[in-house]
Amino acid sequence: MSKQGLSVTVTGINKKFGSHVALDNVNIFIKPGEFISLLGPSGSGKTTLLMILAGFARPDSGSVKFGETEMIRMPPHKRNIGMMFQNYALFPHMTVGENVAYPLKLRRTPKAEIVQRVTTALDLVKLAQYGDRRVDQLSGGQRQRVALARAVVFQPQVLLMDEPLSALDKNLREQMQIEIRQLHEKLGMTTITVTHDQREALTMSDRVAVIDHGKLMQFGTPVELYERPANRFVAGFIGESTFIEHEGRILVVRPERLQVEKPGQLNGGDWIKFAGRVQSVIFQGDSLLSTVLLSDKAGGQGVALQLRQTVSRTAACNGSLNIDTEVEIGLHRGDAIFLDESKQ
């Protein structure tokens, strides 16, 4: 069932709703077979961009190409895209198999081929024995799998997904992230999904397009976004961060990269050091999330700095994380991320 995906080229896309700018000169090139997430807060414009790719909305200006074919004036049903909606949009009066077969019937696929493709698609999503079940007999996770099977059964070269996992509980959502990624690797189609969940985007994607107020903030791999954020918005949206003025620049401090010791215990010049007092310590299972109020002499000017330590590592800190204890916090210079203030 594998089929190579198409490239997707978004050039100069602009879209307004009245006076509201939904998309502002967005440019993205997606390679054939890539898994891309459009990530951003509510109202950022990510869903509008997906709807333009699907053909359900038309931009005020710009170009969208699948491969070498311009899509702006192409109606949705002629774009040969798989589409998975947030609410799954399954037909309640149809069985699982009939739901999955629906796109093939619209394309007048021969009956024998429909049976074979439906069987293959249900097997891919681990629902091989569910073809005769009614939709209302399924769990949320099973309905999600049916919607996914229906979206890929006709072998589209581009698959679009609108917040496909938002209705699932945390454990099932994390399981389905892995399953969708594995299915993508089997099928090879270009996949574009919308999400506001940064962990989901980092887990599933080859690259992530971070969007805010209609503008593309950064487009890169999960590692690039985390290690080399282009601006303060990306640094704050991807992962946990505290921003501190240091040596005339903005320093991004990630809580898991900090080392905490008793004052005077961090030796050598490889550390950026801060002094402070422990305000709170929260047990989170395998880690402790602590808040330290930095002293003015630390350069943090009263900033509340968060740090995350594994329980075993914290136990070796000789009680340095007791509330109201004076501590010294170190960030190794090799882990330091400085932002260019001109890009804020």
Image: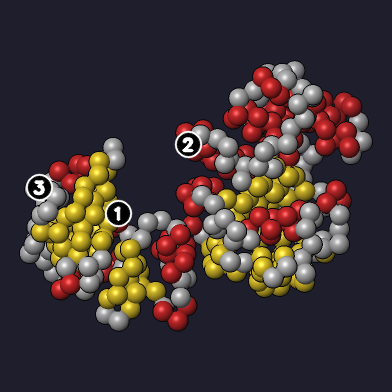
Residue 195 vertical position relative to residue 330 in the rendered view, above or below? above
Apparent side of residue 196 relative to residue 253 in the rendered image (left or right): right
Q: Residue 140 is drawn in which quadrant?
A: top right
Question: Which mark identifies residue 256?
Answer: 1
Amino acid identity at mark 1 = Glu
Can residue 127 be seen here? The reply is yes
Q: Which residue is mark 3?
A: 319
Residue count near mark 2 (Cα–Cα under 10 Å), binned few <14, some 14–19, many ≥20: few
Residue contact between numbered discs 3 and 1, judged by CB atoms under 8 Å: no
Q: Nearer the viewer, residue 328 or 276?
A: 276
Q: Quadrant of the N terminus?
A: top right
Residue count near mark 3 (Cα–Cα under 10 Å), binned few <14, some 14–19, many ≥20: few
Q: CA distance from mark 2 to mark 3?
A: 33 Å
State the SS at label 3: loop
- Position in image of residue 185 (x %, y %): 61, 44
- Position in image of residue 265 (x %, y %): 8, 61
Apparent side of residue 338 relative to residue 85 in the rendered image (left or right): left
Closer to the chain start, of discs 2 and 3, is 2
Question: Which mark identifies residue 161?
Answer: none
Q: Nearer the viewer, residue 17 or 140?
A: 17
Q: Which residue is mark 2?
A: 170
Q: CA distance from mark 1 to mark 2?
A: 22 Å
Apparent side of residue 78 relative to residue 211 in the rendered image (left or right): right
Q: Residue at x 74, y 59 (%)?
A: 52
Q: How is the image coloured?
A: secondary structure
